[in-house]
Amino acid sequence: MSSSVRSEIPNKLYFKIGEVAKIVGVEPYVLRYWESEFHSIRPGKTRSNHRLYRRRDIDALLEIKRLLHAERYTIEGARKRLKGFAKPIPERTPMALPLGERAYRDALARVRHELEAIKRLLG
């Protein structure tokens, strides 16, 4: 995906299907079809059942469009290609804790205790 397309994506958490259709350059029904074919595309839904896409969904949709339209892959070929390029999960690196590990552990223990108390109250 080109950096110019990536920079055109507004900086927000969720996007409606019409916004995504404009960004990707396809009709909303195409996005719904791609959702059924590519299981990595799973937008959230509101209570009224409207789709809410995340930025990573848009990135995946742009890649799908590139594979299908520019590279001329079939749906099955694009699906296989996307599986081969799944991003590896980065290894977790320990964070430098400015207050010291003991202070964070104590704070987390207090939060856990308070949450358990709230859970007991709610039954």
Image (cartoon, grey):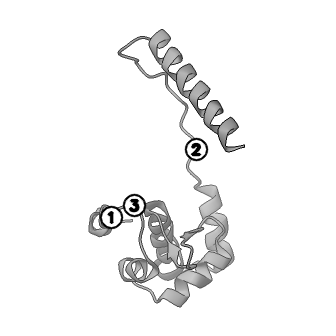
Which of pointers 2 and 1 lies earlier in the amino acid sequence?
Answer: 1
Label 2 element class:
loop
Question: Local crowd at mark 3 within 10 Å, few (<14), some, or many (≥20)?
Answer: few
Disc number placed over residue 88 in the picture, else none: 2
Question: Local crowd at mark 2 within 10 Å, few (<14), some, or many (≥20)?
Answer: few
Amino acid type at image mark 1: Arg
Q: Nearer the viewer, residue 108 or 29?
A: 108
Question: Local crowd at mark 1 within 10 Å, few (<14), some, or many (≥20)?
Answer: some
86 w.r.t. 58: above or below:
above
Label 3 element class:
loop
Q: Disc 1 to disc 3, how far (Cα)?
A: 14 Å
106 relative position to 25: left or right: right
Residue 40 placement (x, y as % from top left): 62, 64
98 w.r.t. 44: above or below:
above
Q: Residue at x 55, y 79 (%)?
A: 48
28 w.r.t. 88: above or below:
below
57 relative position to 119: left or right: left
Amino acid type at image mark 3: Leu
Q: Nearer the viewer, mark 3 or mark 2?
A: 3
> In which quarter of the view is residue 16 placed?
bottom left
Q: Which residue is mark 1?
A: 6
105 w.r.t. 36: above or below:
above
Disc number placed over residue 13 in the picture, else none: 3
Residue 41 placement (x, y as % from top left): 58, 68
